Image (tube, rainbow, N blue to C red):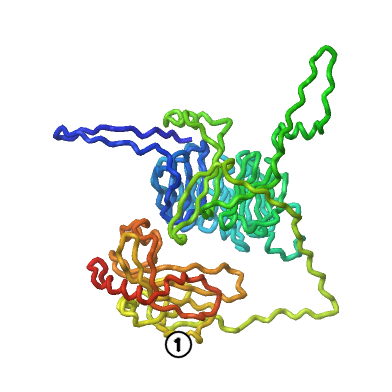
Amino acid sequence: MARRTAPRRRVVVGGGGTRRTIKAPSTNARDELSLDDRPLAVTPSEDGRLLVVSLPWELWIVDARTLAVQRTIPLKSARPSACEGWDGALWIGGQHLNRGNLQAASATKVGSKLGGYVDRVALIRDDLLCGVGSNGEILWDIDRQTPVHRRKSSSRARVEVVASADGRAVFSDGSSSCWVLDPAHTEGYGQLRMAATSPAQAVAPGEAIVALGTTTKGRVVLAARDGAVAWTARDLRLAGERMPAKGGEALAVAGDERWIYVLRRRGLLQRFLISQPAEVQRQQQDGGKKKKKRKGMPKPKPAEPVEALPEAQQVRLDKLASTLALLAPNPNPSASASASASASGASAAPIKKQLVLAGPKADGQLGRLWLADPEALAWEPLELRERELVAPPPPPDPDESSTPERPSFIATRNKPQGPKLSTINVDDIVGARVDYWLTTSVNSILDRPVEAKTLAQVDTLLPADALLLPAMVRFSEGTARPALVLWPGLTLDSEAPTPELQWLVWGDEPRGWMALETPQIRKQKWSRTAVFPLQVALACVPEGAPGRRAKLDARWNDREHFLALARECKKQLKVLW
């Protein structure tokens, strides 16, 4: 791994003989690390001393012992994924394939025409990288900088990809099966699924694999939407499967040789036993039989009974978490990792088994990361049950003529006819002249057409219409600004997830409307901590808007607060239009 040296205290002598002391950062461990955005994933380094935290549009390199931020890597991908290579190299997937390093604060683009193939990446060998995405799968030769295998398939979106202990890639596409890609046999993929799985003809959306992970010893962990969990041996043969009586969709999985940890929604953490300790296994094999006394030997002492571990446990965390990783001591550290540990002075503090948890805060606008000792949590017993399978549908009756389903021509959205969103006048918002605008959910957000509407025209809206609500916001640093809230909708029978709210504010340089995302915040030379959390006020809300939409906070609908922020904004010379 890459050599990491401990920061030192330096004394710099200036030209006039002045002395300036540069102190090293504090080595005291903190309880929690505040993140600038909601965390997507956490990946420990190979030596377990660094954490690679994936955030929208950037990566954070964090010390695993003190939770101190060592460096950040800005990116151009909204959902980056990272894996560590040889000598501290970082392979970063997303819209493009990038290469960075644990010791560098930048990343460079690698290859061309890889978009849609590297949304998720995993290193399956020291010289071979596997990427999966919405367009298909690819194997990338690191030494020759060229793909050695590419398969195009746009049937399903890829969820995740992990590397097995024997040099194969396992990826999930949202179905009830995972697929195994062997670099030595790329002409066909293997299929990996749970033992208790409905027949292929049955429609069972709850059996879809939604999370993949690996243990510290190379086992692959599968988690389904209905709560079922399974794990394999090192050779990808199924070794165990559990179905909790209460659970839900898994957000992240991790494990070691004793437990499989599964993080679920609302801060619910569950763990499932892989195998009992050796003492318990010997006790179970003996079956309580008394050992015979040999001639001339003293009478053997009765062995103290060892309590067996429960098959499953759960605990409710005191903070909401959305991703999970496991830090475990490496029994066979590499030579480079040992050299790096001795150079940084961290050999005196061995790595302890800890859970790395990260989740959102401030309504999902910021995030946090913290460590937890799994043995110190208040675990409770968890009941298990059998998985309920779905029966295949009956075969069609040959006597009955099958009529194909007719397409529906019922309109689900209106087509606004008006100017572009970028031309909306700020005075229409500050003066509360327009109740809301009708727009679309496609094309570039600033180029979308908008049409002014009144609250009396709510009856003319359709379920898939996107609405633009005028708002006033106050940044965390105190500046009041005009804003717009994009409120998209979906039909009730749509299988797509409910779209999230999107914010637009009036920027300074350049002056105009901008999406409140990290790339645009960087152009304005702002920081996310100076922007979020937002204080929001809406002039009015179109009650009874049809369709499935994200829920608006009831505290935002405050017209008096809206007018007060508008008056404050008019007096500020910082916000000009």
Instruction: Please state the horizontal and vertical placement of residue 495, each as a whole percent of the image.
Output: 61, 70
Q: What residue is at 59 percent from the left and 40 percent from the top?
A: 375
Secondary structure of residue under mark 1: helix
Query: Would you place residue 97 above or below residue 399 in this image?
Result: above
Instruction: Please state the horizontal and vertical placement of residue 433, each as a whole percent of the image.
Output: 34, 82
Residue 235 showing in the rendered view: no
Residue 119 showing in the rendered view: yes
Residue for badge 1: 456
Name which quarter of the figure residue 423 lies in. Answer: bottom left
Total numbered badges shown on the rendered structure: 1
Q: Amino acid at mark 1?
A: Ala
**Furthest-top residue in view?**
296
Name which quarter of the figure residue 431 lies in. Answer: bottom left
Residue 188 horizontal side relative to residue 542, left or right? right
Which one is in front, 466 or 510?
Answer: 466
Query: Would you place residue 350 above or below residue 156 in this image?
Result: above
Q: What residue is at 51 percent from the left and 38 percent from the top?
A: 48
Query: Would you place residue 544 above or below residue 318 in this image?
Result: below
Which one is in front, 141 or 19?
Answer: 19
Which one is in front, 8 or 187?
Answer: 8
Instruction: Please state the horizontal and vertical placement of residue 285, each as a whole percent of the image.
Output: 80, 33
Which one is in front, 451 or 182?
Answer: 451
Q: What residue is at 68 percent from the left and 40 percent from the top?
A: 234
